[in-house]
């Protein structure tokens, strides 16, 4: 199928800076209640169908209309789990008919509350047929109401760290504890909430995004008009019907910032939009169960977020001359449709169901296979907005935090938020490497059915749209170099891999010697690394790769029998789980016997449990491993330096000599392959993170070793 992208509505000022002194910004905002008038109403967001007959909190559409004298656009955030593109296209057309706003200049997104009326079929729940036309009309009404409230305004940006209120819910499972998917296959190497039991997992499958961002609007005399907030946290969980924490945040912000409306003026409107949260939830599984604050109430959670937002609001710098630009792209993407065998399995189950909804997970996913087979592909919509030097990018998906970071860190605009589930509800788009690990977010369904390459395609489209509205190229993101990184480079390494990539397959060599490595499948990216204050600058987080079965394959041709390797390790595997907990690096021929070459690892039940082990041998006679002295604590960063000096081998742990042994250096020729995160024969590969790998084609001095370890 040909990939089709259509760009529309781009307004780019190529001859002037991103913000023009001639722009006269006006802003209007309004809230329209979209609570259904008829009950019971279907509620989606769960595996099976359910309905609600009462209202805990109203559900609303919150609209902001912007005008600079040349362009006019609308941003609407709706208390809904997700909304389908055809419904939103119809609502945009209806709004355009009663306003001065073009359909491609209207952004409509869902908050992703799991306790709202269903306007879109997902998993075991159908769309509620009586609610769809009602919501369509209310969306158009909210935009028209906001337009009527237009008045002169100034705009500002605020951001604060709310990392305490969000965390990774998707964790990597141990290789010996792989679970089954709904089709009966053992494919679940990662899944949400797997870390309830620490013994089952090796670590998080990706990074979090801690930013609570604000685009705020005031009148010229300082009266608050509206705040569009954005945060990456999936949902809190509440009793239906409810706007969840999104609605509580919006109302709490109003009460604290502008509870009283001056006579003749429109009320203040607070809005919480959904950041990239496909693998995010509020519970931090890194903490022991007794420290996870599982009893926190939704009201407290929302109130504490409001407090953070107000702190950021106080530091906002305002400007009145922000001009506007908006662009849209429509792209056709394929679904991952079932093969013949799975389709026949699904059709038998669906035929037996008749007209009733699914009653269990098997029936849910059987029905989804039939639906995907019928659909084959879909059209997705993405947009970018520029408000002065502030950017907004969108995806119509449940997008991983990593994807949001990719867009933010490369955006051509210095301040950017990413709003997900905007202009459609096209399900999870895991980065391609996450598909290999399986889990709920990857099981083919309308809720997660797009092609494996959907995430990079949509990330690139978002960046292109931001470039279009900014009128300049994206930033080339590169991790900063702190004193520890400079120390490694000053020691003249033969190769230096920082493992800070957004994605594979290439690990870039920072030494300047162009010895890039290749990530094998089974590695995930951009996790937090060691010693951020030493390896990076200006408060940046050092980034690392997490190994889950794959290796980093490299080639250094001039090592000989005198070389040094320095790297940082973070073990995620319980040391009683297998005979070798994991091999850290291996010098040997790919697929060669494990007894050929030399290998450094972490001992398991066979020998040296929890301690470093060095193994060297040849085809004729395998040697027993040399074992270190110190237990290495799970989920902690440790520096390892391996030194070969002829027949002498020394291994240092955090600067202290851990292993000293002799091993023949009669290597065959050529012998230039090195693997990190696994052994040359792919046995007992590393389960955890590695970072800051440097290879030197000489033996480092004790002073140099001490400096690198520090």
Image (cartoon, helix red, strand yellow):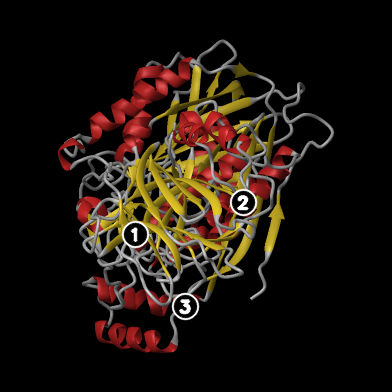
Task: Please determine whether, in this image, residue 258 is positioned above or below residue 96.
Answer: above
Residue at 60%, 70% in the rendered image: 669
User: Which residue is at the front of the view, 344 or 588?
Assistant: 588
Q: Earlier in the sequence, mark 1 or mark 2?
A: 2
Contact, mark 2 vs mark 3 (Cβ under 8 Å): no
Query: Could you tell me residue 2's position as x and y percent?
Result: 67, 73
User: Which residue is at the front of the view, 1 or 354?
Assistant: 1
Q: Return the mark for residue 508.
A: 2
Task: Please determine whether, in this image, residue 310 is positioned above or below residue 186.
Answer: above
Circle nearer the viewer, 3 or 1 = 1
To which residue does mark 1 refer? 582
Indicate the secondary structure of the residue bearing disc 1: strand
Q: Which quadrant, please, contains the C terminus?
A: top left
Query: Could you tell me residue 665's position as x and y percent?
Result: 50, 61
- In this image, 469 relative to 313: left or right? right
Query: Could you tell me residue 191's position as x and y percent?
Result: 32, 59
Circle nearer the viewer, 2 or 3 = 2
To which residue does mark 3 refer? 337
Report how far apart the C-alphas of labels 3 and 1 lie in the structure. 37 Å
Indicate the secondary structure of the residue bearing disc 2: loop
């Amino acid at each position: 199928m040909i990939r089709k992208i259509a760009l529309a509505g781009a307004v780019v000022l190529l001859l002037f800076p991103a913000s023009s002194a001639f722009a006269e910004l006006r802003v209007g905002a309004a809230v329209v209640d979209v609570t259904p008038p008829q009950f019971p109403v279907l509620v989606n967001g769960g595996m099976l169908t359910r309905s609600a007959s009462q209202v805990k909190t109203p559900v609303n559409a919150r609209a902001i209309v912007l005008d600079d004298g040349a362009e006019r656009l609308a941003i609407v955030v709706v208390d809904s789990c997700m909304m389908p593109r055809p419904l939103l296209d119809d609502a945009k057309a209806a709004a355009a008919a009663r306003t001065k706003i073009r359909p491609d200049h209207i952004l409509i997104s869902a908050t992703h509350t799991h306790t709202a009326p269903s306007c879109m079929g997902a998993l075991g729940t159908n769309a509620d047929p009586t609610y769809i036309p009602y919501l369509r009309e209310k969306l158009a009404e909210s935009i028209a109401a906001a337009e009527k409230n237009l008045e002169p305004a100034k705009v500002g940006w605020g951001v604060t760290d709310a990392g305490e209120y969000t965390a990774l819910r998707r964790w990597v499972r141990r290789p010996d504890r792989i679970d089954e998917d709904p089709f009966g296959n053992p494919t679940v190497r990662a899944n949400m909430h797997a870390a309830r039991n620490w013994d089952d997992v090796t670590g998080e499958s990706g990074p979090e995004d801690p930013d609570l961002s604000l685009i705020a609007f005031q009148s010229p005399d300082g009266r608050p008009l509206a705040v569009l907030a954005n945060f990456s946290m999936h949902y809190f969980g509440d009793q239906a019907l409810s706007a969840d924490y999104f609605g509580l945040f919006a109302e709490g912000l109003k009460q604290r910032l502008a509870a009283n409306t001056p006579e003749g003026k429109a009320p203040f409107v607070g809005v919480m939009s959904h950041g990239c949260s496909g693998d995010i939830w509020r519970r931090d599984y890194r903490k022991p169960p007794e420290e996870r604050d599982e009893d926190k109430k939704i009201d407290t959670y929302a109130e504490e977020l409001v407090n953070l937002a107000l702190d950021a609001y106080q530091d906002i710098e305002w400007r009145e001359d922000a001009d506007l630009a908006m662009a849209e792209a429509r792209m056709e993407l394929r679904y991952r449709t079932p093969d013949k065998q799975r389709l026949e399995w699904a059709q038998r189950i669906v035929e037996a169901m008749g007209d009733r909804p699914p009653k269990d997970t098997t029936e849910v996913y059987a029905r989804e296979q039939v639906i995907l087979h019928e659909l084959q592909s879909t059209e997705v919509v993405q947009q970018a907005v520029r408000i002065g030097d502030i950017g907004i990018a969108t995806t119509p998906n449940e997008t991983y935090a990593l994807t949001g970071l990719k867009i933010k860190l490369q955006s051509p605009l210095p301040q950017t938020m990413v709003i997900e589930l905007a202009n459609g509800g096209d399900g999870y788009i895991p980065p391609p490497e996450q598909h290999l690990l399986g889990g709920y977010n990857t099981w083919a369904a309308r809720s997660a059915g797009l092609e494996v390459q959907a995430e990079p395609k949509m990330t690139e489209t978002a960046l292109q749209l931001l470039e279009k509205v900014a009128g300049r190229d994206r930033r080339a993101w590169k991790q900063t170099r702190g004193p520890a990184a400079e120390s490694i480079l000053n020691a003249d390494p033969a190769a230096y891999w920082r493992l800070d990539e957004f994605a594979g397959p290439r690990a870039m060599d920072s030494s300047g010697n162009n010895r890039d490595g290749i990530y094998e499948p089974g590695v995930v990216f951009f996790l937090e690394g060691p010693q951020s204050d030493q390896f990076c600058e200006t408060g940046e987080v050092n980034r690392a790769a997490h190994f889950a079965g794959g290796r980093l394959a490299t080639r250094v041709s001039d090592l000989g029998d005198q070389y040094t390797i320095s790297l940082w390790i973070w073990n995620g595997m319980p040391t009683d789980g297998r005979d070798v907990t994991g091999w850290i690096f291996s010098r040997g021929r790919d697929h060669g016997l494990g007894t050929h070459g030399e290998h450094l690892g972490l001992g398991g039940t066979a020998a040296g449990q929890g301690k470093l082990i060095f193994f060297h041998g040849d085809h004729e006679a395998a040697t027993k491993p040399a074992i270190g002295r110190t237990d290495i604590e799970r989920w902690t960063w440790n520096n390892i330096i391996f030194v070969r000096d002829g027949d002498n081998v020394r291994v240092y742990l955090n600067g202290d000599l851990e292993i000293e042994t002799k091993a023949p250096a009669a290597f065959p020729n050529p012998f230039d392959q090195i693997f990190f995160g696994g052994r040359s024969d792919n046995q007992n590969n590393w389960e955890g993170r590695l970072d800051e790998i440097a290879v030197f084609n000489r033996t480092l001095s004790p002073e140099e070793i001490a400096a690198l370890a520090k």
